[in-house]
Image (spheres, rainbow, N blue to C red):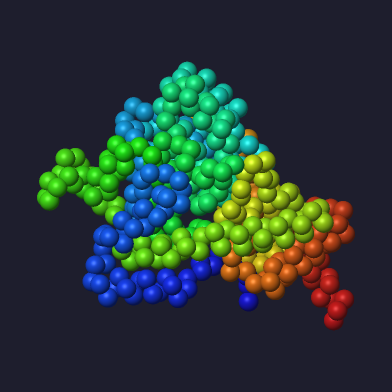
């Protein structure tokens, strides 16, 4: 059986809490959602949490609550899931991109400065993406934002519990957004959350997700229905109780993978800057020949994932965008993620490490480029010899 790249950990406590909601009859938005909002914002170390239907709606809600829209420009990374940039456009603003750090894959502060200068100071906000479970360099990015009077929004969809020093992601910007999709560090099935320390932003966010409602059938603006359900929040409360345990398991698994990769010459393991706590939503490796690497692991029953094979600025939906970002484009060609989730057993982890060592030995035994076609030829030759 193949080892999957992700495997949500749903247990008896999640089922118990969902059963309680079902028995109550209050299955839509309600008190359980309010409890989850309070618990999650407390976890992040901020004042307010506003639960939404998913991570993408959380981003759109944050932009609207901060007053971003037509005529505004938001600077972000081209190396992320497309929802990051789409949410900017959905609220009517313009998405601009700056290149990434080639080692951490998060926004490069120097590239941000260059882009602001190139755009002649017309940037209004920065959407920072904490990618793969690693926080972006928020000290430097916050300094840039202060210099240019820019709003900062954190896309923390992949970084629940990640830290710089003693501050968790979600506590750096004017607002931050999380996703609770099943592959994330914790899940509600589908769901999202906006967190903020600003009362007015929280009020606007709550109003927007509920059709602009300010009273019983009284609506002060055109809003949307982006509410979370009590069922989802019940799962979230149980998952939040286990998040520290999940993240510790991810870090332990990552330590084993990194130790193995350092034994062999097949790729660059994740880089963790000083003072950062990585929570390894993905364990992402830079490899020279990704196709051969993925093919070998797939044949060996080890799942992989490529996040992301096409930068946002090269997506068909952004074909009118004119720009090139070499580090993002290189990452899109070379990165691959290995299983690191907390459901890995000790034997799973041993198997992954054994497969990595075997690939390293195979790679070292050939002088030509190791391609999927060359792998197939070598395997066929081996099978012939065995026959």
The residue sitting at the bottom extreme is 387
Coordinates of residue 40 in the picture (x, y in percent): 42, 53
Q: Residue 301 or 69: which is nearer the viewer? A: 69
Q: Answer above or below: position of 358 versus 312.
A: below
Q: Answer above or below: position of 144 versus 209.
A: above
Coordinates of residue 285 in the picture (x, y in percent): 68, 52
Q: Residue at x 42, y 70 (%)?
A: 14
Q: Residue 22 or 295: which is nearer the viewer? A: 22
Q: Answer yes or no: is residue 130 visible.
A: no
Relative placement, left or right, of 126 versus 276 is left
Q: Answer yes or no: is residue 152 visible.
A: yes
Relative placement, left or right, of 44 versus 65 is right
Coordinates of residue 131 in the picture (x, y in percent): 56, 46
Q: Residue 8 or 330: which is nearer the viewer? A: 8
Q: Residue at x 59, y 65 (%)?
A: 342
Q: Residue at x 45, y 76 (%)?
A: 12
Q: Residue 91 or 109: which is nearer the viewer? A: 109
Coordinates of residue 218 in the picture (x, y in percent): 12, 46
Relative placement, left or right, of 307 versus 252 is left
The residue sitting at the left extreme is 217
Q: How many marks?
A: 0
The quadrant of the rendering that contains the N terminus is: bottom right
The quadrant of the rendering that contains the C terminus is: bottom right
Q: Residue at x 65, y 50 (%)?
A: 335
């Amino acid at each position: 059986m193949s080892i999957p790249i992700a495997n949500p950990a749903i247990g008896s406590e999640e089922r118990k809490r969902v059963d309680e909601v079902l028995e109550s009859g209050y299955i839509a938005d309600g008190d359980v959602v309010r409890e989850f909002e309070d618990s999650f914002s407390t976890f992040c170390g901020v004042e307010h949490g506003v639960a939404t239907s998913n991570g993408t709606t959380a981003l759109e809600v944050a932009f609207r609550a901060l007053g971003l829209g037509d005529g505004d420009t938001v600077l972000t990374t081209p190396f992320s899931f497309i929802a990051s940039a789409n949410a900017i456009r959905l609220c009517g603003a313009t998405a601009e991109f700056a290149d990434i750090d080639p080692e951490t894959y998060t926004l490069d502060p120097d590239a941000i400065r260059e882009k602001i200068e190139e755009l002649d100071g017309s940037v209004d906000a920065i959407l920072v993406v904490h990618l793969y479970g690693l926080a972006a360099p928020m000290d430097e990015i916050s300094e840039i934002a202060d210099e240019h009077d820019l709003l900062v929004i954190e896309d923390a969809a992949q970084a629940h519990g990640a830290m710089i020093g003693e501050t968790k992601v979600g506590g750096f910007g004017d607002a931050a957004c999380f996703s609770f999709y099943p592959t994330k560090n914790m899940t509600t099935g589908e769901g999202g959350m906006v967190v903020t320390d600003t009362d007015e932003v929280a009020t606007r966010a709550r109003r927007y997700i509920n059709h602009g409602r300010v009273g019983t059938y009284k609506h002060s603006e055109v809003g949307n229905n982006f509410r979370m359900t009590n069922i989802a929040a019940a799962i979230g409360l149980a998952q939040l109780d286990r998040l520290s345990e999940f993240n510790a398991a991810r870090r332990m698994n990552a330590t084993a993978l990194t130790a193995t990769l350092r034994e062999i010459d097949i790729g660059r393991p994740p880089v963790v800057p000083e003072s950062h706590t990585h929570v390894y939503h993905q364990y992402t490796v830079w490899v020279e020949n990704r196709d051969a690497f993925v093919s070998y692991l797939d044949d060996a029953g080890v799942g992989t994932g490529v996040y992301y094979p096409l930068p946002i600025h090269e997506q068909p939906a952004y074909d009118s965008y004119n720009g090139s970002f070499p580090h993002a484009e290189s990452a899109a060609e070379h990165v691959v993620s290995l299983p690191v989730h907390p459901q890995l057993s000790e034997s799973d982890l041993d198997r992954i490490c054994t497969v990595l060592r075997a690939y390293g030995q195979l790679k070292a035994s050939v002088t030509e480029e190791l391609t999927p076609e060359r792998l197939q030829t070598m395997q066929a030759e081996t099978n012939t010899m065995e026959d």
